[in-house]
Amino acid sequence: MIRTFISLGSNIEREYHIHAAMTELKKLGVHFEVSRIFEAEPVGFSGPNFYNCVVAFETSLSLSVLQQTLKQLELDYGRAPDAKKNQSRTLDLDILLYGDVQRHASPTLPRADIYKFAFVLWPMAEIAPELKIPGDDRTVVQLWNEFGTEQALWPVDVVFEESHESL
């Protein structure tokens, strides 16, 4: 089993898509953990605010199968196959870490978003503060404490209607 961290984001029907993604991801492994949900302004384009969170779980899926599964989930939940990076989306699922794997081919690991975006790093710091990023001597909480940004980000209290589950 490999511990993986996945970033979830949506700015179209946010509650529905984040909840659907969590439900689907729970089927891919065990020991599922989820950060709080954060609302964030889009970075690099204008559009509705995003809901973002990070989930961690242990999986027996290979990296390539996990990547294919996440891309298929994005498509299944309405993401256009030719979707551009800086545009609104129903669902965005990115592998941040896959065990201690370091690689430069797609998917690049650790994902650079860990170092660039508050909506990735703050949620990671919540669920794995003492985790060291592969290839970096710093822990997630150290990275968060050193993070300087003007990115607007705040936690939100989201209650998923069908399950009455509060995150």
Image: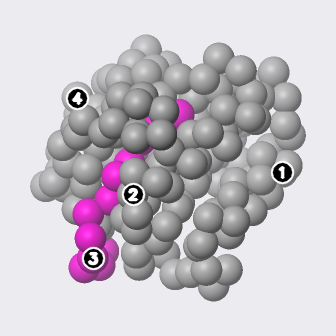
Q: Earlier in the sequence, mark 2 or mark 3?
A: 2
> Which residue matches tag 1?
64
Q: Amino acid at mark 4?
A: Asn
Instruction: Tell me if residue 152 can be seen.
Output: yes
**First in sequence: mark 1 vs mark 2:** 2
Q: Residues within 10 Å of mark 4 (few under 14, many from 20)?
A: few
Give the residue at x 86% y 40%: 62
Residue type beneath disc 1: Ser
Mark 2–mark 3 distance (CA, rounded to whole Å):
13 Å
- Closer mark to the observer between disc 2 and disc 3: 2
- The answer to which of marks 4 and 3 sits earlier in the sequence is 3
Disc 2 secondary structure class: helix
Contact, CB < 8 Å: mark 1 with mark 4?
A: no
Residue 94: percent from left, percent from top: 58, 52
For image coordinates 61% across by 39% down, the residue present is 23
Residue marked by disc 3:
47
Classed neighbour count for the residue bearing mark 2: other residues with Cα under 10 Å, few (<14), some (14–19), many (≥20) = many
Q: Is 119 covered by the magenta stretch?
A: no
Q: Which residue is mark 2?
A: 14
Can you say which quadrant of the picture contains the N terminus?
Answer: top right
Q: Nearer the viewer, mark 4 or mark 3?
A: 3
Residue at which label 4 appears: 145
Q: Tell me the magenta residue range.
A: 44-55
